[in-house]
Amino acid sequence: MARGWLRRLAVLAGIGLIACGAAPEEARFPSGPIQIVSWATPGGPSDLLARALAEAAPDHFDGQRVTVMTRQGGAGAAGMQYLRGRAGDPHVLGVFTASGTVNMATGRIPFAPGDFTPILRIQVDPFLVAVRDDSPFHTLENLFETARMRPGAVSMSGFGAASAHFLGFQRLRAAAGAPDIRWIAYAGSGDAVVAALGGHTDAVHTNYNIVREHLRAGTMRVLAVALPLTALRDTPVYRDAGYDLAPVHWRGVVGPPGLSPEVRADLRDRLLATIRAAGFQEYMARASMEYAVMDDSDAFGHWIAEEVETSRALLGRLGLLVNE
Amino acid sequence: MTGFAEGLATALEPANLAALLGGSLLGVFAGAVPGLSSTVGLALVLPVTFALEPTPALLMMISIYMAAEYGGSITAIAIGVPGSSPALATTFDGYAMTRRGEAGRAFGISLFASMSGGILGTLLLVVALGPLSRAAIAFGPPEYFGLGVFGLAIVANLVGRDPLRGIISALIGLVAFLVGLDVLTGAPRLTLGSTMLMDGLGLVPMLIGFFAIAEALNGLAGHRAEVEGTAGMRGALPALRDLFRLWRPVLRGSAIGGIIGAIPGAGATIASIVAWNEERRVSGAPERFGTGEPAGIAAPEAANNACVGAAMIPLLALGIPGSASAAVLLGGLTVQGVAPGPLLMTEQASLVYALYAGFIVAVVFMLAVGRLGIPLWVRVVSLRPQILMPLVVAVSLIGAFVLRGNLADAWFALFFGMVGFLMLRRGYPLAPAVLGLILGPMVETNYRRALALSSGSHTVFLESPISLVLIGLAVISFAAPALRSRLRLGRGGA
C-alpha cells in the first residue's frame, strides 16, 4: 500500500521534472515560490526592505508565496554565493546595497558586479553629519575648521571600518581638504549615535532614520545632509555648504546571473508594481525612507559597477585594500 | 497609575492575551533549544508581526524575549547544555544539582528566580527609564573596557583547582574571538583566506560545540558523570520556604541584571556570569559554588530575566538597541510605525503602558508554561544519555544552522566540539574560554577606541571613575583566590 503510494508520487515527480525541463523558464514565470535572500542584520534597514518586499510582492507575482531567506555570514558572501549559485532562476532575488559594493571593492569577498543581474534600485539613504544639541559646531565648516586648526582633535563615530559609511565620510573629508579627523568605528549605527550622544565623540556620520527621534526631541542636530530630504527641509545640503558631492547609502534588488533581458524586464515590472503597492508605501514612510527608483536595469548595473570602482580607488588611496 | 491600569486593560484584551501566550510558548522553546535564542525566536516571528496591530505585535515580541531567557535554563539544568548563552552560568550549579538527583528543585528555583528577575527588571524600567538611559550613554570606550576587564577577572573564579589550565582556556577563547574582520579597521584577522571565517567563529557554535558535542563525545568515551538519585527525588519541587530563603541572591542578581542590561552592548550573558560570581563572592562559602548551590542558579537566572526589562531602557528612551534581540525588536517596531526615542513616552504613552503591563502578564505566562512544563523537563533528565546526547547534538547543529542560515556555523560547532573534547580530557575548564570569546571584543575594541580618542594616553582609563572602579574590582577579584589560598596555607602551616 505504502509502496504503491510512493511509486505514484515518484511518477508524478518525474512528470513534473520532464515538464519543467521541456518548457522554457520564461514561458511561465513565476512557476513556484519566490525567495528573497537577505544577508543583512535581522531587523536592520536592508533586512526590513527584504521583508517589506516579501509582504507586498505576492499580489504582483501571480499570488505565489514570497519568503525571505536568511543567509548571513562572510560579510554577505554566504548570501551572495547562494544567489550566484542559482544562475538563470528568476525565483531567487537578493537585496543589494552600497555595503555589498564596498565589500566587493575591498577585495574581502570574491564577488564582482557581473556575478548578478541588476534589476532596480529602490532607495537612496543620504549620509549626514549630526552632533549633540550642546555641541560647539553649528555648521559643517565649523567642524572642519576646528579639525584644520587642531589636527586629530575632532572625532567622528560611524558604522564600520572600510564600510560604505566610512567611505561616505572619507569622500566628504577629502572635499574639505582632508583635515585630520579620527574615525571611531562601531559595529552598529545605533552604537555610533550613542557615542556622539554620550559626548564620547564629537559627531556621528550616519543616516536620517537612525537619528530621527533625537532630532525631533532636540537632543541632536544635523549639521548637513548629502541630499535634500523632505523631513530635513531646513538643513543645509552638502552642496549648499560648499562640498560638491552627495555620498549616499542605497538599496535595490538584483537577481542571479544569467537572466535573459525578457525575464529581467518582467521581474523589473513586477517589482515596480510591488514597491508602488499601498502596503509597501506605508513601510517606506514608517521607516523614513524616500524612493529613489532607478528602473532602468542597465543604468542600475552601471551604477553598481561605478560604485565599486569609486570605492576601490578611494580605498587604494587610503591604503585599505585587502591583498588577494 | 491610571496609565498603568489602562495599559493592563489593554494587555488583557483577548487578542493581546493570545499574542502574549503564543509568545511565551515560542519563547520557552527558542530559549531551551541550544542554538536557538531569543534573537532567533524574534527574527522568526518578525514576518508574523507585520500582519498584527502594533500592540499585539509588540506584546508577542516582548513575551518571546522574556520567556526565552527562562527557557535557556531548562537545558542548562537538565543536561548541562546552555539553551542560550545567558544560561551559561546556570549550568555551573544547575547541572550539578541535577547530577545530585535534585533536578526538580533546580527547575523550581530557576523558574522562581526568572519570574522575580523579570518583574524586578520591569519595575526598574518603569521607575528609572529616564535616569538609567542617561547613565547608559555615559558609558564610553574607557568604561566598556573597564567592564570587560572586570568580567574577564571572573576567570580567576572559574578555573577550579588548576589556575594555569583556566588561564590557557581563557586564552583559547581570546584567540577564537580574534578570528574575523577587525571591527576598527575592517582588515581580516586569522581568517586563513576564507570568506566564511570573516564574521568570526561565533558564540553559539562555541556553546554548542563545548557543551553539547564535547560532552556527548566525552560520554561516548565513557567519561560522562552519571546522574545519581532516584526518579522520585528528581521530580521533587522545592518547597516555598526553600524559594523564599533565596530572596537575597534573587535581589542581588536582579540588581546586577538591571544595571548591566541597561548598558547597550553589555547584555544578559555577561550580567548572569557577573551575578553568579558576585553571589559566590558574598556567600562566605565560595567553594560550594559549582557543586549545586541553589543561590548559584537563583542569581544568574534572576539577572538574565532582569536584563529583558533593562534592555528596553536604551531602546525606548534613546531608540538604541542594547542587544541583538533588542535590534530585532526595534526592526519590528519600525515596521509598525512606532518610533522609540526621547518622545515615545509623551507621544505614545498608552503603548508604553501596555508594554509595561505586558511584561508583567508575560512573566505570569512564563511562570505558567514553566510550572506546567517542569514534569516534562524532569522526564528529559531521566532519558538515558546514550539516547539523549545524540539527539541534543542533532538539534543543536540544526539550531546552529538556523541562526544565520549558514552551514559554516554547524562546522564551527563541530570544530569547537573537538577542541572542547580535548580540553575536557586534559582537564581544562571550558567556561573561561567562553568568557574570553564574549569579553575579548569588548575589551579590545574599546581599549583601541579609548586610545584613539585620548591620542594614545593610557591615563584615560584612570580618569573615568567608572572605569577606575571596575578595573580596581577586577584586580581584587583576580587576586582574591590566590590571596585566600595563601592565607589558608599560612594558617595551616602555623
Image (cartoon, coloured by chain):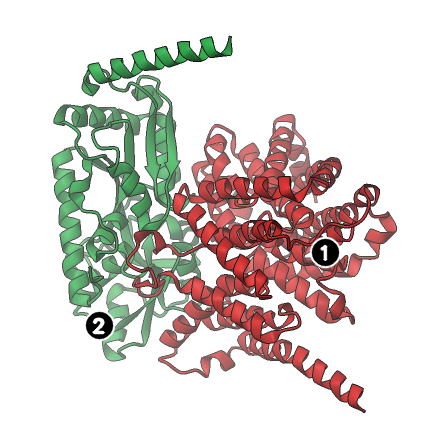
Chain colours: A green, B red
Please state which amino acid type lies under the numbered disc 1.
Ala
Q: Which marked residue is nearer to the observer: mark 1 or mark 2?
A: 1
Res A179 label: 2
Q: Give x and y (percent) for residue B343.
A: 50, 49
Residue drawn at point x = 56 percent, y = 53 percent: B85
Q: Vertical placement of B166 versus B74: above or below?
A: below
Q: Of helix, strand and loop, which one carries label 1?
A: helix
Classify the position of the C terminus of chain B by image quarter: bottom right
Along the viewing direction, whichever of A97 and B282 lies nearer the viewer: B282
Please state which amino acid type lies under the numbered disc 2.
Pro
Give the crowd class for mark 1: few <14, some 14-19, many >=20 residues within 10 Å.
Answer: many
Res B48 label: none
Residue drawn at point x = 50 percent, y = 42 percent: B399
Q: Marks 1 and 2: same chain? A: no
Q: Give x and y (percent) for residue B91.
A: 66, 55
Q: Which residue is mark 1?
A: B96
Residue drawn at point x = 70 percent, y = 85 percent: B486
